[in-house]
Image (cartoon, grey):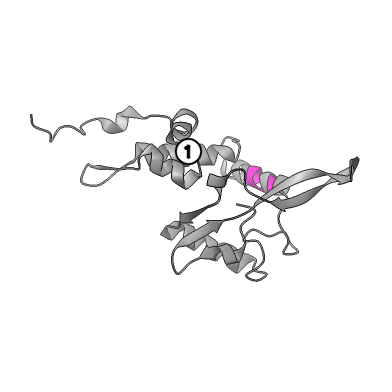
Amino acid sequence: MLGLLNSDIDLENRVMHLNRSVIEISKRDGVTAEKGREVKVGKLKSATSKRDVPLNDTAIEMILDLRNEFYFGEDSPLIPDENGNFTRPINFRKRYYRILKAAGIETKGLHSLRHTFATNLVNGVKQPDGTIKCLTPRQAGDLLGHSTSQITEMYYVKRDNSRLVGITDSFEI
């Protein structure tokens, strides 16, 4: 997320292109460690991490809100620091924890949002007509950048069978 540039987001076609990551590393001069840390922009974790992700109305609204708050141009990060540079991951985490605390929400790591998202995609959302709208583990894995659906199922999805109550009521054999 911190590696997204404004130019990676195509609002007209409702898609964002994930191309780079941002990590924080210890400063070095060759092989010698120096005091302090620095932000490094680089490749994503794996080949499947580089992907296009469709945007829904809520995501587009949030992107527009971010751009209204801080916009330093198309080649700047979507979530910039106060100078328009890439945000340090530790600073983003601290901001996230402050938001959770202010909202009275139990402190959870940022990665838990990914797990919740995957779980909700696979377990689905009950529709007004009683049907459940959901994705397959493969579809959810594609959105998350997983190389196999087994990764999604084993590490990300917590099954909620209570959402299945009544799902077979209309089936007649």
Circle 1 packing at 10 Å, graded few (<14), some (14-19), many (20+), is few
Q: Is residue 158 left or right of residue 44?
A: left
Q: Magenta segment range?
A: 94-98
Q: Is mark 1 on a helix, strand or loop?
A: helix
Q: Is residue 7 above or below residue 161?
A: below
In the rendered image, residue 72, in percent from the top left (x then y), is placed at 68, 69
* Residue 120 on the magenta segment: no
Query: Where is residue 97 shown, x and y percent of the image?
Result: 65, 42
> In the displayed structure, would residue 108 be above or below residue 3?
above
Q: In this view, does 101 lie above or below 61?
A: above
Please tell me which residue lies in front, 134 or 98.
Answer: 134
Q: Nearer the viewer, residue 152 or 35?
A: 152
Location of the C terminus by quadrant is: top left
Main secondary structure along the magenta-highlighted residues: helix
Q: Residue at x 59, y 41 (%)?
A: 110
* Amino acid type assigned to the residue bearing label 1 in the image: Thr
The residue under label 1 is 116
Q: In the image, what residue occupies the spot 47% across and 54% down?
A: 53
> In the rendered view, does 38 fall on the left or right side of 72?
right
User: Is the residue 65 above or below the residue 26 in the image?
Assistant: below
Q: Is residue 170 left or right of 120 when viewed as pictured? A: left
